[in-house]
Image (cartoon, helix red, strand yellow):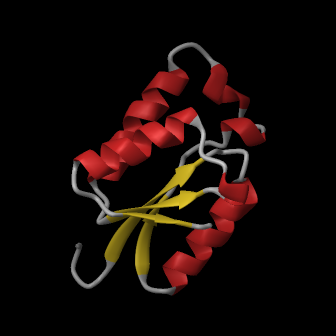
Amino acid sequence: MVGKYKVITLCGSTKFKEQYLEAQKRLTLEGNIVISVGLFGHSGDDEVWTEGTKAMLDDMHKRKIDMADEIFVINVGGYIGESTRGEIAYAESNGIPVKYLE
């Protein structure tokens, strides 16, 4: 934990942009440092799909998980895609607690 603030990394499908923004706001107001995604590929940020970018962003997100005290999964309707499942497994294998929106 950084000082008195817990660091929380958000994970989940980027098609849930509004829920990401809501969770980021709520968790911040609760006194947490929130690390989110840089781009929402499934919500219109087409740069994600250029060659090499998705792989870079996926690797970068694992570094964001490394910095976290816990991850918070945006699983609207219980949806957890392949990338998110991998991030959850990565967090758990590194002893990082996982919490869920739903």
Where, quadrant-wise, is the C terminus in this rendering? bottom right
- Give percent across and percent down for residue 18: 74, 61
Q: In this view, does 41 lie to the left or right of 82?
A: right
Q: Residue at x 60, y 75 (%)?
A: 25
Compared with 81, 27 (above or below) is below
Compared with 100, 39 (above or below) is above
Q: Which residue is drawn at 28% across and 58% down?
A: 96
Q: In which quarter of the image is residue 69?
A: bottom left
Taking the view exactly as shown, the residue that stands out farthest to the front is 78
Q: Is residue 16 left or right of residue 81?
A: right
- Give percent across and percent down for residue 91: 32, 50
Taking the view exactly as shown, the residue that stands out farthest to the top is 51
Taking the view exactly as shown, the residue that stands out farthest to the right is 44
Where, quadrant-wise, is the N terminus in this rendering? bottom left
| Front residue of 76 and 58 | 76
- Give percent across and percent down for residue 51: 57, 13
Q: In which quarter of the image is residue 19?
A: bottom right
Number of on-image labels: 0
Q: Residue at x 66, y 45 (%)?
A: 14
Q: Residue at x 73, y 57 (%)?
A: 77
- Give percent across and percent down for residue 4: 26, 85
| Front residue of 38 and 13 | 13
